Image (spheres, coloured by chain):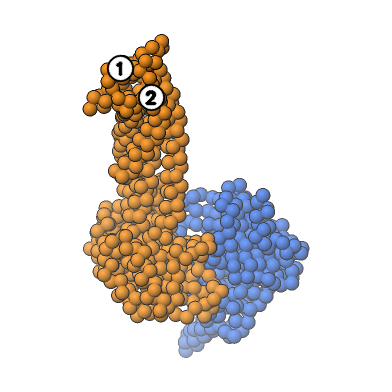
Amino acid sequence: MKKYIIGLMVLLMVGISGLSAISLDEANRILATVDTSRNFSGIDFSAVMTMISEDQDTGVEKKKVQQFRRDDSDMFLMLFIEPASEKGQGYLNIGENLWFYDPQSRKFNHTSMKDSFGGTDAKNSDFGSSSIADDYKVVAVKEGKLGRYDVYIMDLEGTNSEVTYPTVKIWITSNNNLILKSEDFSATGRLMRTSLFPSYANVGGKYLATKMIFKDELIEGKKTQITVTDISTKDLPDSIFTKSYVERVNR
Amino acid sequence: MNISKIAIRNITRQKKRSFLLGGAIAFGVFIIITIGSFTSGMTETLKTNFTSIMGGHIYILGTETLDSGRVVQVIGDTADLGKAISTIDDLVEEYHIRSQVGMGEIIFGSKSTTLQISGVDWNKEEMLLKTLTVTGGSLENIDNPGMLIIPELIADKIGVMAGETVLVRMDTVTGQKNVGEFTVAAITKDQDNFSFISMAYTEMGYLNGLIGLGPNEYQYLNLHLNNIEDMDIASERLAAELKKTSPVDLGKDDSDDEKEDQRHGFMFGGFAPGAVEEPWEGTKFSITTLNDIMEPVLQLVNILNIVSLSLFIILMLITMVGLINTFRMVLIERTKEIGTMRAIGMHRGSVRSIFLLEALFLSLFGAFGGIILSGVTTIAAGLIRFTSDSPLGLFLNNGKLQFITSPSGILKVVILLSIMTLAAVYMPARKAARMKVVDALRAQY
């Protein structure tokens, strides 16, 4: 009898641990706070990003990018500083439009937020303002641990057919709602990319991932590590978010 | 007859001088005919390659706008299009429906490369099947879902063999990321070495599922005409009929660069469809012809032809100045001879004809030399095999440059050269003809 009781208790505990500790509504509210804590509303933001890409085929590549963001107006500018061969290239986003500037051809070409950023494993959308709560809804949530952190593990589904990845799984810290890890799945359900955000900085009351690792799950050994430095929240002149500025810095 | 013989004999009297003058003329003719052959060959190769890779001469692309304002490539409702197409049925040899992944990434282990995948209905692709030369695997089960035909270039890059499984990363029509698993059914010889686009083929239904299209939907309808000359007439008739029911864009109407870039982006991959300012109802059709695509190349060819013609004229002008001087000298050298010929009864006109014929024969010999030299050069250059990743890839036919020398082009050059020669030598010839017999016989030089 004692054995059965212990067995039942173990089963109950396993069952309880598998149940979601929070409701889906609550999980969706947490998702909204992720956007709020990651978007720099009311302030401008600039930083330097160092990207180290590893690929078994092409080896290790290092890029340095100057980033300017004004989330209130949904604008950003990413200018390549290094390597010399890519210096002056830039991504300018104004609202719905994202252009890539090539100083060689001196032309701006429309590109998509879903495309790879400068051939790395990061997407252009990884560097703009966050809209995860608009783009996705939580379909399942459970509590768990990621390393030493207590996290909510959420399965997300796109709210429309235009989101980059139809389904996403994220690990959010339960104490301050920071995304530590995300797995992006294709429409056929295959894991395409794993992103890790191991360190954050508090910048003007907002959280900014200062280290990001994007791992391509389809190509063996392909990943990109991004480190963010020289962070500033000083006001940026309006002229920065213009095509003429991008052209001017290349003269 | 005698006059011609005398003219030819005169050319051989000063062999070195004649050789140099003829050589200069030969060089000019060589330049213009070789460049002309190159540009003609380039245009023809490009037309053949585009026709082969695009599956026809007229390309009809369908686009719809979503509620969000996003543009997606799809032809779902085919009733209006079918009705319009029936009006040019007499001009069309084959219809090809296709869906497409513009910028896919094929992955095998740790290796990957970009490629374009066309989803085709194998039952209607007789022409395409004829152009595919299998070097690995077979075309036996290609109509099974998930079977992929890839060019050698791609197979070599990623080290895959027929029968192995690859992954392809692609975007759906709405821009979502997706991955498809394919089995390499066959590896084919690079299609006409058309290396700037690496085109792979698969069964359309399977590809449609991956890019978010329904089983009966497609993105392009390509028309292969019986006669390529009917291209403009057919596209105009089709557009006129289609305009009765649907919005239509014509390739030749694209005036601004961005719109043209968008169209070519849609067709060749790499373009990110975005929001439009003015959404439309139903399907909007874009009709593009091979001529529209070829227009920038044809402009380049025209510029090249103008440059080579200018170069030819400049070279010939310089040569003609030499020719005038030579025949002035000839006039002085042969003054006594002219006097003697005139004294024994030769007419003024015959003296003039000897001069003119001598110059004309010299030019024609030079032209003949230039034509032979050009022929040898183009045949030799045509034998060189370029690597498939050569920057000339766009202009290669089976890895080689193609030269097309048209007889009418040669005739034009010869006529132009003859006119210039006769004009240049006319004055010395007239002077020789007008010379008084007594003065000529009395001349001390």
Q: Which amino acid does the dot numbered 1 rest on? A: Ala
* Helix, strand or loop under label 2: helix
Chain B's colour is orange
Q: Which residue is mark 2?
A: B434
Q: Is residue A245 above or below residue B83?
A: above
Mark 1 crowd level (few <14, some 14–19, many ≥20, 10 Å Cα)? some
Q: Which residue is depicted at the point 65% across and 51% down? A: A250
Q: Left or right: where does residue A155 sit relative to residue B360? A: right
Q: Position of residue B87 (x, y in %)?
A: 31, 74
Q: Which residue is depicted at the point 68% across and 57% down? A: A245
Q: Left or right: where does residue A48 sit relative to residue B288? A: right
Q: Quadrant of residue B219?
A: bottom left
The answer for which chain carries disc 1 is B
Q: Left or right: where does residue A57 sit relative to residue B53? A: right
Q: Which mark is residue B343?
A: 1
- State whether discs 2 and 1 lie on one chain: yes
Q: Which mark is residue A171?
A: none
Q: Is residue A15 above or below residue A239?
A: below
* Helix, strand or loop under label 1: helix
Given residues B320 and A243, the one toward you in this image is B320
One can see residue A183 in this view: no
Q: Judging from the image, what is the letter of the chain drawn in blue? A: A
Q: Is residue B414 above or below residue B280?
A: above
Q: Which residue is depicted at the point 42% across and 45% down? A: B305
Given residues B126 and B112, the one toward you in this image is B126
Q: Which amino acid does the dot numbered 2 rest on? A: Arg
Q: Position of residue B191 (x, y in %)?
A: 32, 54
Given residues B296 and A77, the one toward you in this image is B296
The answer for which chain carries disc 2 is B
